[in-house]
Amino acid sequence: MKRAVAALAAALLLASGASGGAPPRVDQALIDGDAMPPKLSAFGLFAANDPARPVASFAYTLNTPLFSDYAEKHRFISIPAGTKAHVREDGTIDFPVGTVIVKSFGWPDRDGGRPVETRLLIHRATGWTALPYIWDADGQDASLAIAGRRVPVTFKSPDGEAHSIRYAVPNKNQCKECHNLAGVIEPIGPNARNLVLPAAMTGDATRLYFDNPEALKPVLPRWDDPKSGTVQERARAYLDVNCSHCHNPQGSASNSGLFLRWTDPVGVNYGIGKRPTAAGRGSGGMDFAIKPGDPDHSFLIYRLESLDPGIAMPELGRGVVHKEGVALLRQWIAEMPKEGG
């Protein structure tokens, strides 16, 4: 429901830019340059610098989003006028230079839902640049936080449990770590199998921004919707989104030999009966990343349930355990036939 409401709200907000005189515009020259302005408002990405009024080409949601401490995210993309994105054969999207991918993080029960941070991924002639901005206390603007920061936040998870954490806004290098693919920064979330456009954005509207919109096929199940896929399919969607940006042959965890992309075969390299690649606390003394039929002795689960910085996975972007996500993975592993069973 939240996704649908967010998509509808975003679509309405985008449309609202066409009323009441000339719509606000982004500062494309600033986006195309190499500056890193100290204030988010310099880009002109929000009308009146109100985070609820994006100035965008289109908003989007994801069938299965990355877990970020239960934060609610609002996403949109700004593409330069007269240019279009192209969906590649592998489902990744080639966005034109001058594109900005914008993602704001907040919690509905904190500060009236106003975002804590807004991250920009800007495609410049030299490549993609990641810039994190933290909203000021008065909510009037956001300040560049190249070094990242810990922000105290209090919120409730869906089960009603209260959490008080020091939420981690990543620094610029941490942004690179997750977005690194073969040494190059690339977008992670928006791809053909997971990107969902607003329902009202069809036909000619989609062709304004994509030269082959028919290639956009969001086949990835929703991890938390049993109607969208089997337990295994939804578990694989969860691992693809939350883990595979590092756990792929070209990612920062390539040397682990654990590959968790949606397209990877479910075998040893997917963790089934896979032994640890190095001695250390990460395995918890267990023999296998995934032991079929036995989630309690699968160190993939052990790491997802840990908050110890030397054990927890993912290494970045998580200050609480995603109990619902882990429960899905536990169910998937428990339903696997045991060896010799």
Image (tube, grey):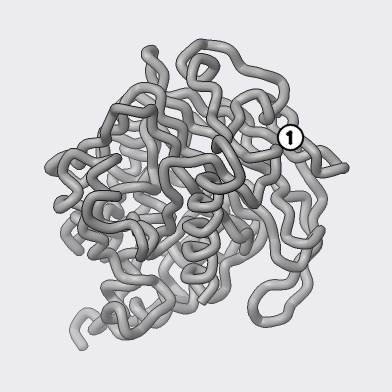
Q: Residue at x 48, y 32 (%)?
A: 121
Looking at the figure, which quarter contains the C terminus? Answer: bottom left
Residue farthest to the front? Answer: 21
Q: Residue at x 35, y 22 (%)?
A: 97
For the residue pair 339 and 215, the one nearer the viewer reads as 215
| Residue in the image at 52% along x and 11% along y | 34
- Quickly name the residue at label 1: 142
In screen coordinates, is 245 left or right of 232? right
**Is there any visible trace of residue 58 in the rendered image?**
yes
Report crowding for label 1: few under 14, some 14 to 19, many 20 or more residues within 10 A (C-alpha). many
Q: Is residue 57 left or right of residue 316?
A: left
The front one of 161 and 112 is 112
Q: Nearer the viewer, residue 92 or 209?
A: 209
Residue closer to the observer: 218 or 291? 218
Which residue of the protein is positioned furthest toward the left in this rendering?
Answer: 89
Number of numbered discs on residues: 1
Query: Can you give x and y, in whole percent of width and height, for residue 157 in the image?
Result: 67, 73
Q: Quadrant of residue 203?
A: bottom left
Amino acid type at image mark 1: Ala
Q: Going by the image, does 143 lie left or right of 189?
A: right
Is disc 1 placed on a helix, strand or loop? strand
In the image, residue 249 sits, relative to residue 294, either above or below, namely above
Residue at (46%, 32%) from the top-left corner? Answer: 100
Q: Position of residue 198 (x, y in %)?
A: 39, 60
| Residue 238 seen by the camera | no
Image coords of residue 282 (percent x, y): 51, 52
Place of residue 138 in the rendered image (x, y in percent of width and height, measured from the top left): 87, 42
Residue at the far right in the pictured view:
138
